[in-house]
Amino acid sequence: MKKILFIILLLMTPVVSALEIPGGDYRDRDDVVAFVKRIAAETSYSEQELVDLFAQVNKQSHLFEKLDRPAEKELEWYQYRRIFIKDKRIDQGVKFWLEHRELLAEVSEKMGVPAEIIVAIIGVETFYGIYKGKDPVFDSLVTLAFDYPRRAPFFKRELEEFLLLSKEQGFDARALRGSYAGAMGMPQFIASSYRNYAIDFDEDGQTNLFDSIPDIAGSVANYFVKHGWQRDGRVARPLVVSENNTVDRLKPGVKTDYKWAQLQQSGLTSQFDITEETPVALVKLQQKDHPEYWAGFQNFYVITRYNHSELYAMAVYQLAKLISREFKKLI
């Protein structure tokens, strides 16, 4: 009798099989299996859903060199500037602004971020939606999360955010394409930014950064607002270096760590009115044969939250000014 009961209990006990990734370039990877198990336990994904996704991954080894050599670190300002400050990009920016004039005015009024800044961001990121990226986002994030040790923790978090985003928005995770680092849509938001800062500006029930211009413009503005954008605040102003200066004793950067009076005392002046107590950053940009100095304000720093580079922020700012100048000629 005891033997029969033992057999019955044995038959009733569920068989626990080891989880396996049966195919793709990440099969037989214990670290991937551990990730899948954790995500399945902590989210609404089933293990089978995740296994099906990971079993199709193709390792994107070509990404490593791109991340190791970003333009912002490889180029000087005079080289970087000419990538983005071009007549064609300015003309297309004016065209984009004219086409969406009423919407951009609404976003700007509501959010406090100038239309030209929104337009310039989209222009720098994807040439107004023409170049959104061709890399498979899921495969890219898996590759960088598990085979790029230098930034693996960051990309592992982004991979998790991407999976959650796909579930929330009803995206086909394997179908989305983006940049080599997993940025998506016309404004190139990474998954965590998409989840935290993207908004449904047109209120149609979906936050769409791929095709909805209202959501795209509103989300760029919201990103800046959430990072401290000051309505009607300045971005940057060029500086003049006096002959007897001590600028080399100062530390350039993007944070507003100085008071304007301190820069003045080091031999820097401006044709623009800046009060002595104004917080500023000393921005140093290298021209071909000399350094160029700017005062960066809070809004300059906010632009660097989009891309942590003074070159990027200055390209956005100068492109915005040029687009605005040409736009105003037409209205």
Image (tube, helix red, strand yellow):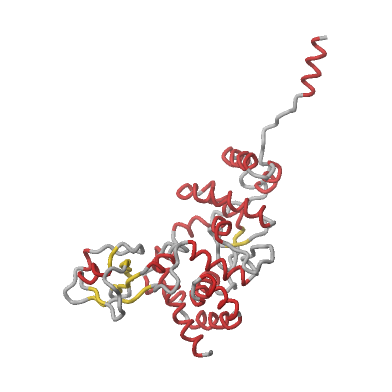
User: Residue at (55%, 55%) from the top-left corner?
Assistant: 192
Residue 72, quarter of picture: bottom left
Residue 231, quarter of picture: bottom left
Is 330 rendered above or below residue 293? below
User: Residue at (27%, 62%) from the top-left corner?
Assistant: 251
Between 76 and 258, which is closer to the camera in this rendering? 258
Between 321 and 158, which is closer to the camera in this rendering? 321
Residue 179 percent location from the top left of the image: 56, 62
Is 58 rendered above or below residue 206? above
User: Residue at (55%, 62%) from the top-left corner?
Assistant: 189
Quadrant in the picture for the N terminus: top right
Residue 105 percent location from the top left of the image: 55, 78
Is 264 rendered above or below residue 328? above
Between 212 and 180, which is closer to the camera in this rendering? 212
Residue 277 percent location from the top left of the image: 28, 68
User: Residue at (47%, 58%) from the top-left corner?
Assistant: 67
